Amino acid sequence: MATTKTKKANATIIETATGKVLGLVTKVNDFALIKTEKAVLSSFAMAEKCIGFSGKLMKKGLKVSASQQDMVFDVLGNIKKKVVKK
Protein backbone atom coordinates (compact mmCIF):
# COMPACT_ATOMS: atom_id res chain seq x y z
CA MET A 1 0.00 0.00 0.00
CA ALA A 2 2.87 2.33 0.60
CA THR A 3 3.72 2.25 -3.09
CA THR A 4 0.17 3.19 -4.11
CA LYS A 5 0.21 6.22 -1.84
CA THR A 6 3.65 7.19 -3.12
CA LYS A 7 2.49 6.95 -6.75
CA LYS A 8 -0.60 9.05 -5.97
CA ALA A 9 1.52 11.60 -4.13
CA ASN A 10 3.97 11.77 -7.04
CA ALA A 11 1.10 12.08 -9.50
CA THR A 12 -0.41 14.87 -7.42
CA ILE A 13 2.94 16.70 -7.27
CA ILE A 14 3.36 16.33 -11.02
CA GLU A 15 -0.19 17.52 -11.69
CA THR A 16 0.31 20.50 -9.38
CA ALA A 17 3.61 21.43 -11.02
CA THR A 18 2.10 21.00 -14.48
CA GLY A 19 -0.85 23.19 -13.53
CA LYS A 20 1.46 25.90 -12.19
CA VAL A 21 3.64 25.79 -15.29
CA LEU A 22 0.58 25.93 -17.53
CA GLY A 23 -0.72 28.93 -15.60
CA LEU A 24 2.65 30.69 -15.89
CA VAL A 25 2.92 29.95 -19.61
CA THR A 26 -0.61 31.28 -20.12
CA LYS A 27 0.28 34.52 -18.32
CA VAL A 28 3.45 34.91 -20.37
CA ASN A 29 1.52 34.28 -23.58
CA ASP A 30 -1.15 36.84 -22.65
CA PHE A 31 1.56 39.38 -21.80
CA ALA A 32 3.31 38.76 -25.13
CA LEU A 33 0.04 39.10 -27.05
CA ILE A 34 -0.83 42.37 -25.33
CA LYS A 35 2.63 43.86 -25.95
CA THR A 36 2.64 42.68 -29.56
CA GLU A 37 -0.78 44.19 -30.15
CA LYS A 38 0.35 47.50 -28.67
CA ALA A 39 3.49 47.48 -30.83
CA VAL A 40 1.54 46.75 -34.01
CA LEU A 41 -1.09 49.39 -33.28
CA SER A 42 1.55 52.01 -32.48
CA SER A 43 3.44 51.17 -35.67
CA PHE A 44 0.21 51.57 -37.66
CA ALA A 45 -0.41 54.93 -35.98
CA MET A 46 3.15 56.04 -36.78
CA ALA A 47 2.80 54.89 -40.39
CA GLU A 48 -0.46 56.82 -40.67
CA LYS A 49 1.24 59.97 -39.36
CA CYS A 50 4.14 59.49 -41.80
CA ILE A 51 1.76 59.02 -44.73
CA GLY A 52 -0.11 62.19 -43.75
CA PHE A 53 3.13 64.12 -43.45
CA SER A 54 4.44 62.88 -46.79
CA GLY A 55 1.10 63.74 -48.40
CA LYS A 56 1.39 67.30 -47.12
CA LEU A 57 4.95 67.54 -48.41
CA MET A 58 3.89 66.25 -51.83
CA LYS A 59 1.09 68.82 -52.02
CA LYS A 60 3.51 71.61 -51.15
CA GLY A 61 6.01 70.28 -53.69
CA LEU A 62 3.35 70.16 -56.39
CA LYS A 63 2.30 73.74 -55.59
CA VAL A 64 5.92 74.90 -55.90
CA SER A 65 6.30 72.97 -59.15
CA ALA A 66 3.08 74.49 -60.53
CA SER A 67 4.20 78.01 -59.65
CA GLN A 68 7.59 77.39 -61.29
CA GLN A 69 5.91 76.06 -64.44
CA ASP A 70 3.63 79.10 -64.51
CA MET A 71 6.67 81.34 -64.19
CA VAL A 72 8.46 79.52 -67.04
CA PHE A 73 5.40 79.79 -69.30
CA ASP A 74 5.03 83.49 -68.46
CA VAL A 75 8.68 84.09 -69.38
CA LEU A 76 8.28 82.09 -72.60
CA GLY A 77 5.11 84.05 -73.42
CA ASN A 78 6.92 87.35 -72.89
CA ILE A 79 9.82 86.17 -75.06
CA LYS A 80 7.37 85.12 -77.75
CA LYS A 81 5.72 88.56 -77.68
CA LYS A 82 9.09 90.26 -78.09
CA VAL A 83 10.13 87.94 -80.92
CA VAL A 84 6.83 88.41 -82.75
CA LYS A 85 7.12 92.23 -82.51
CA LYS A 86 10.57 92.19 -84.12
Image: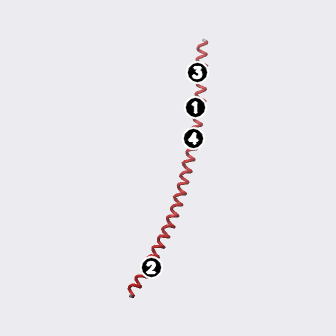
Residue in view at x 52 percent, y 64 percent: 57
From the viewer's side, name the closer residue of 31 and 74.
74
Residue pushed farthest top? 1
Q: Earlier in the sequence, mark 1 or mark 3?
A: 3
- The secondary element bearing badge 3 is classed as helix
Residue under circle 4? 32
From the image, tell me which residue sits under label 2. Answer: 75
The answer for how far apart the CA atoms under marks 4 and 2 are is: 64 Å
Q: Is residue 36 left or right of residue 77?
A: right
**Which three-letter amino acid code belongs to the residue tagged 2?**
Val
What residue did someone put label 1 on? 22
Comes first in the chain, label 4 or label 2: 4
Q: Position of residue 72 (x, y in %)?
A: 44, 76
Q: Secondary structure at mark 2?
A: helix
Identify the mark nearer the N-term, 3 or 2.
3
The spot of residue 6 in percent (x, y) is 60, 16
The residue depicted at 61 percent of the width and 30 percent of the height is 20
Q: Are marks 1 and 2 in contact (CB under 8 Å)?
A: no
Residue mark closest to the camera, 4 vs 2: 2
Secondary structure under tag 4 reads helix
Report the residue marked by disc 3. 11
Nearer to us: label 1 or label 2: 2
Q: Amino acid at mark 1?
A: Leu
Neighbour class for label 4 at 10 Å: few (<14), some, many (≥20)? few
In which image quadrant can residue 4 be found? top right
Assess whether mark 3 and mark 1 are in contact (beta carbons under 8 angstroms). no
